[in-house]
Amino acid sequence: MLDNLKKYLDDIGFLLFAVVPTVVSFFIDIQNGSHEWFQRSGSLMVLFAVGLEFRQTSSCSIKESKTVFSEGVAVATGGEMPKIRRILHLAAIFLIAIGTAIWGYGDVAFKYFGYN
């Protein structure tokens, strides 16, 4: 299990770089009564989540694809995605959507909930 986790350490790093700056900037902006850093952190969330998704799709297509011969012709088929890779893939898609919403409407959320 630990060896499996070490294999995905870079991916988990991308996940943390996507989430931690947004959470930190949220609390900083609540303390300061502003919304600029939280809104800008949405772009970082999207950037690192896209990097994570790129790593997931590229490594899945290269490392886990299988070649099957059908009637003498080589046909590439996708292998089954490991559970942790599926979780990281779904997390990346979720973070891309949330990061885009924060990036575009982070200031509106602050105003709506009365933090500004």
Image (cartoon, helix red, strand yellow):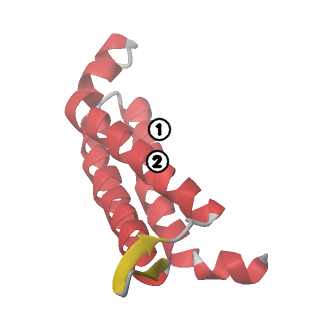
> Residue 53 or 18: which is nearer the viewer?
53
Residue at the image point whose x is 34% and y is 46% from the top = 96
Give residue 115's mark.
Answer: none
Residue 14 lies, with reference to residue 73, above or below; the image says above
Q: Are marks 1 and 2 in contact (CB under 8 Å)?
A: yes
Whole-percent x, y for residue 58 in the image: 36, 74
Residue at 44%, 66% (x, y): give it.
14
Q: Please state if 9 lies on the left or on the right of 38 as rendered.
A: right
Q: Nearer the viewer, residue 9 or 63?
A: 63
Amino acid on which the number 1 mark rests in the picture: Phe
The quadrant of the picture occupied by the C terminus is top left
* Residue 42 coordinates in the image, percent (x, y): 30, 44
- Splitting the image into 4 quarters, where does residue 81 fall? bottom right
The residue lying toward the viewer, choosing from 88 and 79, is 79
Q: Does 84 sit above or below residue 110?
A: below
Who's the residue at 38% across and 12% down the image? 114
Q: Give the residue furthest to the front.
A: 71
x and y percentages locating residue 51 in the rendered image: 33, 66
**Three-letter code for the amino acid on which mark 2 is drawn:** Val
How crowded pointer 1 is (Cα within 10 Å; few <14, some 14-19, many 20+) is rated as some
- Vertical position of residue 80 compared to residue 74: above or below: above
Q: Is residue 36 left or right of residue 89?
A: left
**Secondary element at image label 2:** helix
| Residue, far right | 1
For residue 27, which numbered disc appears in the image?
1
Q: Quadrant of the N terminus?
A: bottom right
Residue that numbered label 2 is attached to: 24
Disc 1 element: helix
**Which percent across, then down, holds residue 37?**
29, 43
C-alpha span from label 1 to label 2: 5 Å
Using the image as rendered, state which of residue 112 and residue 6 is in the foreground: 6
The crowding category of the residue bearing disc 2, from other C-alpha atoms within 10 Å (few below 14, some 14 to 19, many at least 20), is few
